[in-house]
Image: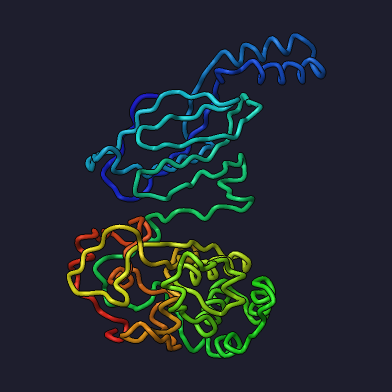
Amino acid sequence: MGTMEFPQDPSAVALEMLLVVQPEKRKTVQRLQIDKQMKSHGSSQSQGADRIHEEVKVTSLSSISLILSCMELEKTRNKAAIRSGDRWLGGCIMRSVTSCAIQMQQVITSCSVQGTQVKVEVHDRNSMPQLFKKLSIGKGLQENGKRRPRPPSLKDQHAYPWDKSCLKSMPFDLKQFEKLDAYAKKVTAKNSVEELVKTLLRVTRTDLEKVRAIWTWICHHIEYDIVGFFNKDKQSFKPKDVLQSGKTICEGYAGLFEQMCSIAGVQCMNLSGYCKGHGYRAGQTFTGGYDHAWNAVYLDGRWHLVDSTWGSGSIDDCFSKFTFRYNEFYFLTHPALFINNHFPDNNNWQLLKPTVTLKQFESNMLYKSDFY
């Protein structure tokens, strides 16, 4: 209770805590525990349980991981202050955090003297949206029954500006992919996304090879839908529809890549933001809705960036014809290079330290992939 202060730091802060709590609406919880204890230990044990529930204790350095990334709450850069009040839901205390509208609907129907294990993340307005779609006690954050990919952290960040060490965010030799790429290009399975992924994974062993096979297949089989770009309302960006039609725009590319990675067991995120793509003019400002989509993929304990739309080919100056022209540059691109023409709606997904402001992004000179 009260105020928690953190030093100025753009990265998240992790605290290990144990909460032994007393719910406001404790009658139901107490009744459940009393009934259970009466059956096994008699009424005397039930009275002991009542006394236990009369206490509220908070101790630290134990089993709750409280990940806090409120580094700039309420326009404060020097410190992040989280002033919280008590909200009791079922048998677990939740925090009402200023500027962080987190709503937890799962009711915990039991309390333990040893504490309740809960994973909590508190984010500012510039962090992962809708992170708490489901809270699963003892199983971490989950969404639609699947474990939610973790948001980017300090370990994912690369130095900015580019240090000219490598064009990629992780080292690898392109020669190791020659046979894999050749195989993926020839795969024609289109009955379902699941069948396609299963066929591609026959020759893969590592997560990197899985992602490479998926990337290569998309870049050589899905063309940019120029007509569909002007009729977005009539387009379906569902992966199965993109697979069947063989054409789409950036949303479809990113959605198909994300689902294929998910089927392959690799964590992947669908990102959106501004881009300096077709029609961009030097000095142009970016306002309104975001105009591009790409992906982040989790490999070897870090997040990496890919853009299969731009990896597949290019459009002529008249925006009338798409040509397959594979571009290796946008596979696991170094974030300090990726930011030159991709500005995500969430600065954390720049994967940079320090991050680039929108004004900087607008004023920076555009370097196309051929330059490198």
Q: Residue at x 60, y 25 (%)?
A: 91
- Quick check: 326 left or right of 163? right
The image shows residue 209 at horizontal and vertical percentages of 56, 77
The image shows residue 357 at horizontal and vertical percentages of 23, 58
Q: Residue at x 33, y 71 (%)?
A: 338
The image shows residue 83 at horizontal and vertical percentages of 35, 28
Front residue of 285 and 107: 285
Q: In the rendered image, which quarter is residue 157 located in?
A: bottom left
Q: Residue at x 59, y 52 (%)?
A: 147
Front residue of 96 and 237: 237
Q: Is residue 7 above or below residue 319?
A: above
- Quick check: 160 left or right of 200? left
Q: Is residue 42 above or below residue 256?
A: above
- Quick check: 108 left or right of 348? right
Front residue of 100 and 36: 100
Quadrant in which the N terminus is drawn: top left
